[in-house]
Image: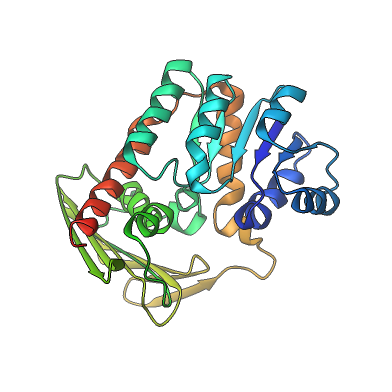
Amino acid sequence: MRVLMVGLGDIARKAYLPVLSSRGDVELHVATRDPAVRAQVARDHRLTHHHASLDAALAASRFDAAFVHAATPAHPELVAALLERGVPTFVDKPLADTLAAAQALVETAVRRGTPLAVGFNRRFAPDYAALRGRGASLITLEKHRHRQPDRARRVVFDDFIHVVDTLLFLAPAPVQRQLIVTQVAGGLLHAITLTLAGEGFSAVGTMHRDSGLDEERLDVIGAGERHSVLDLAERVDSAGTQVRRRRGDWTAVARQRGFDAMCDDFLAAARERRPTDAAAILRTHALCEEIVRDAEAKG
């Protein structure tokens, strides 16, 4: 497959380039406007195909799939250009930082019959995915940051969106009720609590942006069991006794955090021209928009 990666920021270099550049079935092209980054990445990953822009890449070749890792404000223009050319497109979260822009891109993907996926890696992280369908009656997910209050839209769409999407992914039944609580001070978002509930379950997601540590903890509780995942690296299973399991010393971070499996799934979708899961993408972005509105209403 001829695959294009647009944008070579930190997450692209740490998570996606090592996965894609090692695949024997992928001819990887990269595009970025930064010549120094472009040259360094080409050297590090022994890439012979690198371009100064998306337009230059599209003029030079046809692609079977594309990954977009540019800054969030650039997503709508880049993704729309790829979808209109029928290129299956994977976008690092969020698809866009407004619901209206996300809706427009999803509509383009559906209209063009072009696969579109968003980088919610926790759906593919093995310790998270294994807890789906476990009959949980209570799900809690905490994801905190050390001294990082920020504008509501940036916090929610660039970070808390992982919490939103994971709760929706793990929910064992349709969501019937929701409660949003935000804490805003000096125009900056400091904390969020999201509660979702449906038949037989509650799911609570929290984030504090002025916490003592960057950390993440998932708990799935029910049927006499409690399963916890700490920082996507340690699993604790309790059913009368407690068993702890850490990621093996030789387990790659990309595999533990779901990037390997997520890339596999998207490339398979691109080959098969699998339809876009428009409902799932829009549910997550719609709920994020509601959280932003709640926070912005508080100044």
- Which one is in front, 202 or 100? 100
Residue at the spot x=57%, y=22% of the render?
272
Snapshot quadrant of residue 219? bottom left
Left/right of residue 170 with respect to residue 108 in the rendered view: left
As displayed, is residue 21 above or below residue 29?
below
Residue at the spot x=22%, y=51% of the render?
293
As displayed, is residue 267 above or below residue 122?
above
How many badges with numbers are in the image? Answer: 0
Where is residue 5 drawn, in percent x and y? 67, 39
* Residue 137 in sight in this render: no
Residue at the spot x=69%, y=33% of the render?
3
Left/right of residue 113 with respect to residue 43 in the rendered view: left
Left/right of residue 264 with respect to residue 147 in the rendered view: right
As displayed, is residue 65 above or below residue 220?
above
Where is residue 197 drawn, in percent x and y? 17, 52
- Which one is in front, 112 or 71? 71
Residue at the spot x=43%, y=77% of the render?
146
Left/right of residue 2 with respect to residue 156 in the rendered view: right
